[in-house]
Amino acid sequence: MQVHHNAKEALDKLVNDSECITALLISREGVSIEESGNTGYLNTTALAALIAGMFTATREVARMVGEEHFSILLQQGTNRHIHISLINETVMMVIIFEDYQRIGKVRYEAKKASEVIANIMQPEPEASVEKLNVAGFREYALNLIDRIFDKPQG
């Protein structure tokens, strides 16, 4: 995948314009590609992997109800919220913000940034999107969780 410095600029603009805390670009495989805003409070490697898994599971739920996929996920917490959107077939954007009253602004700025980033980040022609089966994803997720919490595997 070609990563261009303008993707970072687009994320920086998104953070500034939406007043969110953090914005990330992650691959569907769960790798953090680009980061903007405050990231010191979280493990972006683990977050990227877990969100990629969440999106894979959500894609299967979408198919069960007759959709190809859901392009946006919104997780609402007590203090912090996460907006996750597909940029293209291989990249997702994650936005972490606090003021839920700003969801309209976050969604608006996310849409603008998505369009810019989609034009910047093009999958390589020979790249293929790996599809994890449920058993493969389960094993992957359990191993990841074990590594995150330093739990001995066995």
Image (cartoon, grey):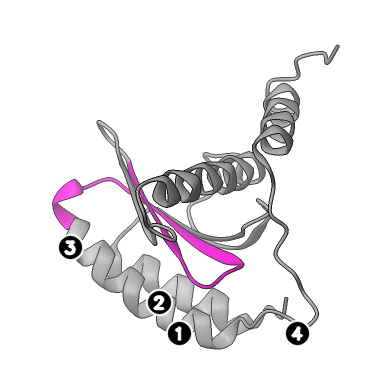
Q: Quadrant of residue 133?
A: top right
Q: Of the residues shown, which amino acid type is indicated by label 3?
A: Gly
Q: Earlier in the sequence, mark 1 or mark 3?
A: 3
According to the picture, the residue beneath numbered tag 2 turns out to be 113
Mark 4 near mark 2, Cβ–Cβ under 8 Å?
A: no
**Which quarter of the picture shows residue 13?**
bottom left
Residue at numbered disc 4: 125
For the residue labelled by badge 4, is the local secondary structure a helix, a strand or a loop?
A: loop
Spatial separation of the CA atoms under disc 4 and disc 3:
35 Å
- Picture layout, residue 126 above or below residue 39: below
Cβ–Cβ under 8 Å for marks 2 and 1: yes
Q: Which residue is mark 3?
A: 104
Q: Under tag 1, what secondary structure?
A: helix
Which of the labelled discs sits on residue 116, or is there none? 1
Is residue 25 or residue 124 the one in the foreground?
124
Magenta span covers which residues? 81-102
Question: The residue tagged with tag 2: helix, strand or loop?
Answer: helix
**Amino acid at circle 1:** Val
Give the alpha-carbon distance from disc 1 to disc 4, as whole Å: 20 Å
Along the polypeptide, which appears first: circle 3 or circle 2? Answer: 3
